[in-house]
Every structure is written in C-alpha cells, then in structure tokens.
Amino acid sequence: MMETTGKIVKGVGGLYQVYVEDLGPVNCRAKGILRYNGTRPLVGDDVRLTVIGQNEGNITEILPRRNSLIRPAVANVDQAMIVFAVRDPEPHLNLLDRFLLWMQTEQVPVVICFNKTDKATEEELKRFERIYRGSGATVVFSKANDANSMDGVYQALLGKTTVLAGPSGVGKSTIMNYANPSACAETGELSEKIMRGRNTTRHSTLMYVTKDTYLCDTPGFSSLFLPEMKPEELDLYYPEFADYRDQCRFPDCAHKKEPGCAVKEALEAGRIEPERYESYSVLYDELVSAKKR
C-alpha cells in the first residue's frame, strides 16, 4: 500500500478516477467516513488516497477546496475558457456575456477564445477584441491549422484547472485534442444543413494535460440562467462602467432612461462598446422581470 495525493478527474456512481502524478489514473472508492460527514467528492477535488493494488485505491481525505461550481459540478477551478467561433456558427454574444457574468459572480477569471479566425476578416477580429477589451476577460484567437495560435491557447491553459465551455461546433474538441492528442476527444462534424454542431461531450470530466494542468469540458452548453442578484447589482459586473457609474446624477441610476446618466454619456461618446451596453440592458430587464415574478 502507498499513501499519496491526487486529483479526482472523473466520478460515476460512487466510483472515482484519481490522477496521480508519476502514477497515472487510479480507480478509487471513497472511504465511509466521507459519506458520514456529508462530504461528497467532486471532480477537481484534491484528495489523499491509499493505493491498495494495481491502479486501485481508496480516497481517505478531501483536501480544502479553493472554490466549487454547480454547473459543471467541479472544484478548485482556476479559470474558465469560453470558446466561440467567429463564424459557422455565428457567435451568440448574449450567451457569451451570460457565461462571463456567471464566472464573475463566482470570482473565476475568464479567457475568451474566438476560434476559426480563418473565416473572418481582420476588421471583424478587431471588432471582437474591441468589444471585450474592457470586460475583465482575456481575449485570445485561434484556428485549427495554425500552430502559433493554437500554442497561444495552450500557453493560456498551463498550470491551471480550466473549465472549457461554449456551444457545439465551435472547436472545443479541437482545442482539447491539441492540448492532449492522446485523449482523442471526439470532434463533432458541423452540419452544413443547419450550421450547428452536434454536442459530442457526454460526461463532465477532467482531462489531464501536463503537470498541474487540467481541462474540464462542459456538455450541453446552450443556455444559461442568470445568477441570483438584484437588478441594481448588475452594473458592478461590467468593468466598462466602473469609471462612470458613480458620476450619474442619481445614486440608484439603472443606466437606462434616467437623465444625467454618465454611463449613457460614455456610451454616446464611444468609450463603452454598444454591444456590451446592449447586453447589460437585456440582462437588466431580465432581472427586473424575474424580480416581479
């Protein structure tokens, strides 16, 4: 027997696969003490385990979590990378902003990856960069057959546990295959008839990439409910508003139709991107409607 530590990369029906550096995956069960104290192991948990046989062991302790997400259910997330194609399919910026908002409320840094850059003009790429340069997220660009851009994405992943999210058909599996070719992530073929990809991911798991580097794919990513918050809290999650919201005439300004709104003045002056303001406006109205129900 050997005592060691590792990270849970998969969990199904009370069985857990724990990845141990220099040893590889170990199939484990959780010791009864974990069930009795109400602690449920999560994918991403760092754990102590006892290896009792060839690739078999028992989880004896869950080490302190830095954080945990509900969707996907994963612990110790360092960052999230949301992937959208610049075209085929067209990027759904409202969905992107919902994900960005959700991660901001969880205090998880976000990398936005715009993929398939060979399908867009330089001006279109500059537009996406301009829209999100003040959002607090890091923006990267990639295309499947360009080693330099794909290596840039790879560098953004190193040393971190990253939740990978995005709609079907945008190239998430291509990124996973580049990060770890041996994982052989199934790549979905884009339907030319409806221009939407088939979701090829069936389970949320962590994929080991290299030392201290893991990827967690998020299956079924097509819509996101807003996190619970008051409508008047929403502007706190738009960093672009930070320099202006305290200059509004009214302290409870919603930045919609109020006179003397410094945020609207900044928008009209071109200091706030119209796509981001429109996103704020739509999400604000949705929060107001939810509050009335």
Image: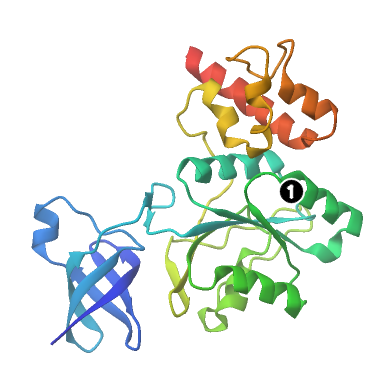
Between 189 and 142, which is closer to the camera in this rendering? 142
The residue sitting at 72% across, 49% down in the picture is: 133
Q: Which residue is mark 1?
A: 91
* Quarter of the image where one finds residue 11: bottom left
Q: Estimate the x, y position of residue 72 in percent, counting from the top left.
A: 43, 52
Q: Image quarter for residue 247?
A: top right
SS assignment at label 1: loop
The residue sitting at 67% across, 18% down in the picture is 248
Residue 50's quadrant in the figure?
A: bottom left
The answer to whether residue 121 of the structure is visible from this angle is no
Q: Is residue 234 shown left or right of residue 17?
A: right
Q: Relative to residue 243, is residue 202 depicted above or below?
A: below
Name the spot of residue 229 as percent of width and height, x first. Answer: 47, 27
Give the side of residue 82 with respect to residue 183, left or right.
right
The front one of 118 and 268 is: 268
Query: How far across and down, in percent of the image, does residue 116 sit?
Result: 77, 63
The answer to whether residue 62 of the structure is visible from this angle is yes
Asked whether 166 or 134 is in front, the reply is: 134
| 89 horizontally vs 210: left or right | right
